[in-house]
Image: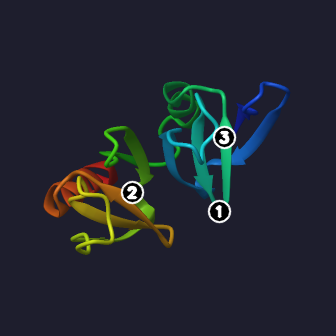
Amino acid sequence: MFIEVSTSDGSGTQRIAVEAIYRLRPSFGAADNPNTTVIDYADRRFFTRDGLAEVLAKIGNAIRLARLTTPVNTPVHLAAAKVSEIREPATGQHEPATRAVVRVAGKDQQVTEEPAAARQIIDQALA
């Protein structure tokens, strides 16, 4: 299954294989295109002007997503089946608000949920 999303400038669209997606979140910070949704899939990152709710609606139930919270207090949706590890943050290596580091598709995602709570949310997404 594929979803079609708008480019960040609205000049076109991109088709993305849903099963390749491992993370969705709103953009933030200087490194992101402002006012976009970030879709991480396979070994790529795509910025769409489509809102997070719109992208989630396009995905529907095609993949099971777990909604967690980033250290900057924004939502992050992770493909629950692609989570391989949840661990405590390393002192001095992560944002102060980080309570757990979730390994998803070989990438680390810092979250504000405690490790046990993050595990429960991910397990619920898989149920």
The numbered disc on residue 42 is 1
User: Which numbered disc, 3 or 1, marks the residue closer to the eye?
Assistant: 3
Q: Characterize the local packing of mark 1: few (<14), some (14-19) or many (20 or more) Cα atoms within 10 angstroms.
A: few
Mark 3 and mark 1 lie on one chain; the one further toward the N terminus is 1
- Which type of secondary structure does the marked residue at label 3 adopt? strand
Observer able to see residue 59 = yes
Mark 3 and mark 2 lie on one chain; the one further toward the N terminus is 3
Q: Amino acid at mark 2?
A: Ala
Q: Amino acid at mark 3?
A: Phe
Residue at x 72%, y 32% (from the top left corner)? 8
Instruction: Work out how far the residue at label 3 is from the one at label 2, CA to CA, in angstroms.
Output: 21 Å
Q: Amino acid at mark 1?
A: Ala
Observer able to see residue 1 = no
Q: How many marks?
A: 3
**Residue topped by disc 2:** 80
Residue at x 66%, y 40% (from the top left corner)? 47
Quarter of the figure with residue 115 = bottom left
**Residue topped by disc 3:** 47
Describe residue 114's horizontal placement relative to residue 74 as left or right.
left
The numbered disc on residue 79 is none
Mark 2 and mark 1 lie on one chain; the one further toward the N terminus is 1
